[in-house]
């Protein structure tokens, strides 16, 4: 994800890295979110499986900063999981979390279009 300044210059804000597709544990592997430009920094992780809308985002200390889910009542009424909720911990940048979720939604071919 990129941020743009008033002159239109872009700056890398975060990078999402999926586990290799040849891994037998892809469904259970974490997606790493780097907020620095160095290759070795993975500050946040998405744990769970986003297409099922059953996952959390954790910070470097392992604290849950956001949770994505579907209410049972909605899941029973709807076949798809297009309607889901996100709970963001107070003090966490909601725009950052929304950007991560929109990117995941796009990666997995859901309704978000970039």
Image: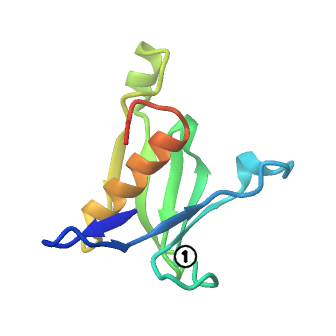
Give x and y (percent) for residue 106. Answer: 46, 41
Q: Residue at x 35, y 65 (%)?
A: 2
Q: Is residue 109 above or below residue 7?
A: above
Q: Residue at x 13, y 71 (%)?
A: 6
Q: Extreme left residue here?
A: 6
Q: Residue at x 53, y 43 (%)?
A: 107
- Residue 52 picture quarter: top right
Q: Quadrant of the C terminus?
A: top left
Q: 106 or 12: which is nearer to us?
A: 12
Give x and y (percent) for residue 44. Answer: 51, 72
Left or right of 6 on screen, residue 65: right
Left or right of 79 on screen, residue 21: right
Q: 1 or 64: which is nearer to us?
A: 1
- Residue 14 picture quarter: bottom left
Q: Can residue 89 be seen in this snapshot?
A: no
Q: Secondary structure at mark 1?
A: loop
């Amino acid at each position: 994800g990129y941020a743009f300044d008033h002159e239109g210059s872009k700056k890398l804000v975060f990078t999402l890295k999926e586990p290799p597709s040849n891994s037998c544990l892809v469904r259970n592997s974490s997606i790493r979110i780097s907020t620095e430009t160095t290759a070795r920094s993975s500050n946040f992780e998405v744990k769970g499986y986003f297409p099922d809308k059953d996952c959390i985002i954790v910070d470097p200390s392992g604290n849950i900063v956001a949770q994505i889910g579907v209410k049972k009542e909605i899941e029973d009424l709807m076949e798809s999981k297009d309607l889901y909720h996100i709970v963001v911990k107070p003090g966490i940048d909601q725009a950052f979390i929304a950007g991560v979720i929109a990117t995941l939604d796009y990666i997995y071919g859901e309704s978000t279009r970039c």
